[in-house]
Amino acid sequence: MYKCVYFLRFFAIFLCFVSPNIYGQTSYVTPKVIAVQSRPYALSDELTVQAGYLPLDSFTRYIALGMSFTHFFTDFFGWEVVNANYASNISTGLEQELATKFSVASEDKFDVLNYYYTTNLVFTPFYNKNLLFNSSIVYGETSLVAGFGISKFDSGNVNCADFGVVFRFLLGPSTSLKFDIRDYIYFAGNARTNLMIKLGFAYNFGTPEQKLEVSSD
């Protein structure tokens, strides 16, 4: 009697494991619909108006105003033909404080930046969609930039290189906001490496909207 009960229990457990496989083999597999969405806007030639902040050294800060022009060959590669900026210096007051309170003349003083311009390669491997206030979708891109240029200081022109990352938020087919972070390296003079934080408004010429492509497997 006990053997019969154990056999029934074993048979019931066996059915629990086997029955899903049996039903899975005989069930009808419905076709799967996959929606593939390309980038909604294709960038071509772009003009950007920008404002930035540069904390060059302990004695001077800068507010930079400028413009840039970029040509995109594909969705992933582009060329920032020129990025030109004028820098307005703001003294931190440290030099005057050292002179008046401690009668010390600073030996760690650096050139004052006047303006700078660079040309850069743009690589955009990341594309994203952001949910804004749980009500609307904002498309965006993340680009890596690197290039070289010239910076004009009081002492003269200095060759420089720059690299960084640009976060873009698309407002529509032709407009977008850009949050730009770059590091500038100077190859001559007594200027230090400088970090720049910049906000820009970009207008793109000729951005055809791409359609949603639907395929079924």
Image (cartoon, grey):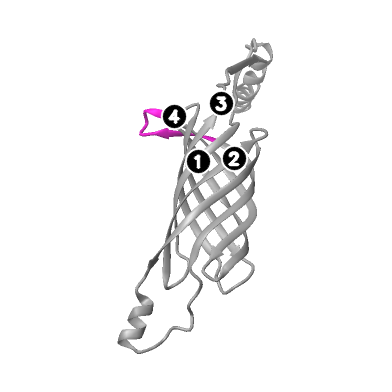
Residue beneath disc 1: 48
Residue beneath disc 2: 70
The x, y position of residue 116, in whole percent, is 55, 57
Task: Count residues near mark 1 (Cα–Cα under 10 Å), then give few for <14, some for 14-19, many for 20+.
Answer: many
Q: Earlier in the sequence, mark 4 or mark 2?
A: 2
Q: Is residue 146 left or right of residue 87?
A: right
Secondary structure that dominates the magenta span? strand
Quadrant of the image for the C terminus? Answer: top right
Q: Earlier in the sequence, mark 1 or mark 2?
A: 1
Question: Is the residue 109 above or below the residue 2 in the image?
Answer: below
Labels 1 and 2 touching (C-beta < 8 A) = yes
Please give the name of the residue rendered at 55% of the width and 29% of the height, measured from the top-left corner. 205
Give the residue type at disc 2: Thr
* Label 4 element class: strand
Quadrant of the image for the N terminus? Answer: top right
Give the foreground label among 2 and 3.
Answer: 2
* Label 1 element class: strand
Please give the name of the residue rendered at 43% of the width and 73% of the height, measured from the top-left corner. 58
Could you say which quadrant of the image residue 80 lies in?
Answer: top right
Could you say which quadrant of the image residue 156 lies in?
Answer: bottom right
* Label 2 element class: strand
Question: Is the residue 169 above or below the residue 18 in the image?
Answer: below
Residue beneath disc 3: 207
Give the residue type at disc 4: Ile
Residue 33 in view, yes or no: no
Which segment did they paint magenta?
A: 128-137
Give the foreground label among 1 and 4.
Answer: 1
Q: In this rendered view, identify the residue nearer to me: 202 or 6.
A: 202
Please give the name of the residue rendered at 65% of the width and 12% of the height, measured from the top-left corner. 29
Q: Earlier in the sequence, mark 1 or mark 4?
A: 1
Residue 137, numbered circle? 4
Please give the name of the residue rendered at 50% of the width and 29% of the height, measured from the top-left corner. 174
